[in-house]
Amino acid sequence: MLNKVQAYIEEHQLLHHDGRYLVALSGGADSVALLLLMLEMGYYVEAAHCNFHLRGEESDHDEQFVVQLCESRGVVLHRAHFDTREYARLHHVSIEMAARTLRYRYFEQLFQDLQMDGICVAHHRDDSVETLLMNLIRGTGLRGLQGIRPRSQSILRPLLCVSRKDIEQYLQAKGQTFVTDSSNLIDDVVRNKIRLNIIPMLLDINPSAVEHIQQTSEYVSRALEVYDDAIGHQRQQAVVAQTEHRLVLDAECITSEPLLFEILKDYGFNRSQVEDIYERLCSAEDAVGRCFPADDFTLVIDRGQIIVEQNKEPMKVLVIPEEGNYNLGGYESDNDILPLSARPNISVMLFSRPADFMPSKERGLVHLDAALVKFPLKLRTVAEGDWFVPFGMTGRKLISDYLTDRKVNLLDKRKALVVCDATNAVLWLVGYRTDNRFRVSEETGQILQIKF
């Protein structure tokens, strides 16, 4: 047992002998065996125990057992008490989910406060197989077929190489007692149903079934390393631009649905949505201009690109009653229409037209004939039906059509800004063009300057 666990730790580089580790100690056979093994291997450990107050006196008895065990072994013990049922009620989650959340949140806090090198939990091979079967029943991709992995950030699992039977035999040989959680003996939740009913049936068919399933999960894990390497290479080729709030992909580089899923899953798109997006992508006529919303992001397919952008609250109308500088609050831009900062300003000023006046060519600075403009001005997003007469032209044009002609994608169209006057006439499609009706001419006396 000891040799097997040591070899597994070395194979996966889970622990180092000058490290400090926190052991999650419930008092059950698995966690007790983990504590004893780590002490026997010479690691420095401290223990953490959670009393969830779900089983009355039995919960308190488990806590006392853990206290006595740690005292007899000279191990520092940290304890926490939780009103698990109340937490579950307030957060509208199951008791099992509430206990899991509270437990790992507490462990993580201790891990940081005590500056430990890892949190060791006693998941074993049987637990991993149960997890794999649960994932399979619910529906899973390749990653769900890995079962439980030996490392997950600060969580370390040194016992995944041994079975529950191995653990019980080890404790018996040591003459070490442990406590039994009676809730694990009732098949009232999915994991217990699998543990108490399905796995015994599988073992009846093949006594090595659990071992073979775990072995298969290891094969899947190794295959995923190759898969991830290939996906990573293809992803680099596909990404045109990426910021915290925006992703642009070259649609021609998306050659498979799995590649698209691996990219989009980080943005909240599920497998069903990705299937629909990829299907539309393969039929170009249906795809152009289509929007696909997720919880926090929206995706659009436009002119050979896939654009994913974080959803934001629409910008509120900013009223500009007179000359001055105005803050736009939290308006942000991830496109290249304007180089906007996190808190951009818009400034409005009047001045007499100089004899040598030349109109601005900057995208964020415009000049208009002040006599033709009526205050207050408004800065807002483009509304349906908005039109203007583009500078240098004589006929009116819908702003949506103008932006389409400029090959602006649907997401950027929705964010486009206009400055209007008191008559709601569009003076400026910000970053693009002013309205020809308000241009500066030889007859202009005063100039209205607007700077973004």
Image (cartoon, grey):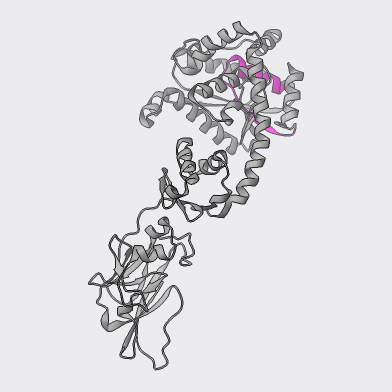
Query: Measured along the vertical axis of the image, is residue 226 above or below residue 158?
Result: below
Q: How many marks?
A: 0
Instruction: Indicate whether 104 appears above or below 243.
Output: above
Q: Residue 65 lies in what quarter of the image?
A: top right
**Res. 299 in view:** no
Q: Nearer the viewer, residue 58 or 399?
A: 399
> Could you say where residue 141 lies in the image, as x and y percent from the top left?
55, 30
Q: Position of residue 172 (x, y in %)?
A: 67, 8
Residue depicted at x 53% and y 50%: 251
Q: From what the image shows, is residue 196 above or below residue 18?
A: above
- Residue 337 falls within the magenta-colored stretch: no
Q: Is residue 28 left or right of residue 294?
A: right
* Residue 115, position as x, y percentages in the image: 63, 38
Is residue 19 a member of the stretch shown in magenta? yes
Q: Quadrant of the C terminus?
A: bottom left
| Residue at 41% over, 89% down | 357
Quarter holding residue 325 = bottom left
Most extreme residue toward the bottom is: 355
**Visible residue check, residue 24:** yes
Seen from the viewer's position, the closer of residues 246 and 341 is 246
Q: Does residue 132 appear to the left or right of 303 in the view shown? A: right
Residue extending farthest to the top is 204
What percent of the width, then of the height, locates residue 298? 43, 48
In which quadrant is the N terminus drawn?
A: top right
Residue placed at 39% from the left, 94% from the top? 355
Q: Nearer the viewer, residue 96 or 142?
A: 142
Q: Which residues are magenta?
A: 18-39
